[in-house]
Image (cartoon, rainbow, N blue to C red):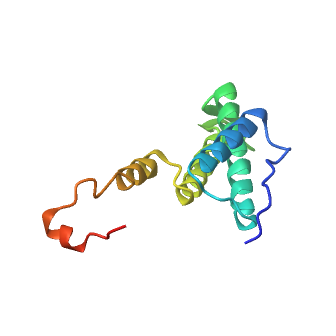
Amino acid sequence: MKKKEFHIPTDICLDAKKYMKQLLQELRDKGIEITILDHVSLELIANTYDLWLDATNTYKKEGNIISETNARNTTITKPHPAIKIAFDSGAQLRKLLLDYGLTLGTKIRIDALQGDLFEEIPPQLQKFRVMK
């Protein structure tokens, strides 16, 4: 697969750009090669994280509950719509990060599997030892 450098979207907030730089560095540190086929997923991660940040900041600034006056001139209170946006984008972001093994749970499982499984070769397997 042809390798082409991924460029972080320019239309996302500064915090999302910083996050994407950290995420890309994490992928490089793990030795994961980013191909053109990964660009859409990485762009989705960037835009979804940006949306999650925006929605979260909005309801934190404006409050969790909003008041509206309906057609009957009755004031009703309801959860801020940004809460659902933050929840949905957070769930989508987690699914995207799972694909790259970048959630805490996935990283713990991967780290456990990467240990030296045969640091000490069990006696029943020693007869199958590959000689160099």
Q: How many badges with numbers are in the image?
A: 0
Q: Which residue is more in the foreground, 114 or 14?
A: 114
* Residue 59 position within the rendered picture, expressed as x and y whole percent measured from the top left: 66, 33
Q: In this view, does 33 lie to the left or right of 5?
A: left
Query: Can the viewer see residue 54 in this picture?
Result: no
Residue at position x 85%, y 44% in the image: 11
> Residue 121, located in which quarter of the rendered image?
bottom left
Q: In this view, does 103 lie to the left or right of 8?
A: left
Query: Can the viewer see residue 92 in this picture?
Result: yes
Residue at position x 65%, y 39% in the image: 22
Q: Residue furthest right?
A: 10
Q: Which residue is more in the foreground, 27 or 20?
A: 27
Q: In this view, does 12 lie above or below 124?
A: above
Locate the C terminus by quadrant.
bottom left
Residue at position x 57%, y 53% in the image: 97
* Residue 82 position within the rendered picture, expressed as x and y whole percent measured from the top left: 67, 41
Q: Which residue is more in the foreground, 21 or 92?
A: 21
> Residue 125, located in which quarter of the rendered image?
bottom left
Q: Is residue 94 above or below residue 19?
A: below
Q: Which residue is more in the foreground, 110 or 82?
A: 110
> Residue 15, located in which quarter of the rendered image?
top right
Q: In this view, does 79 lie to the left or right of 104?
A: right
* Residue 88 position within the rendered picture, expressed as x and y whole percent measured from the top left: 60, 51
Residue at position x 72%, y 64% in the image: 35
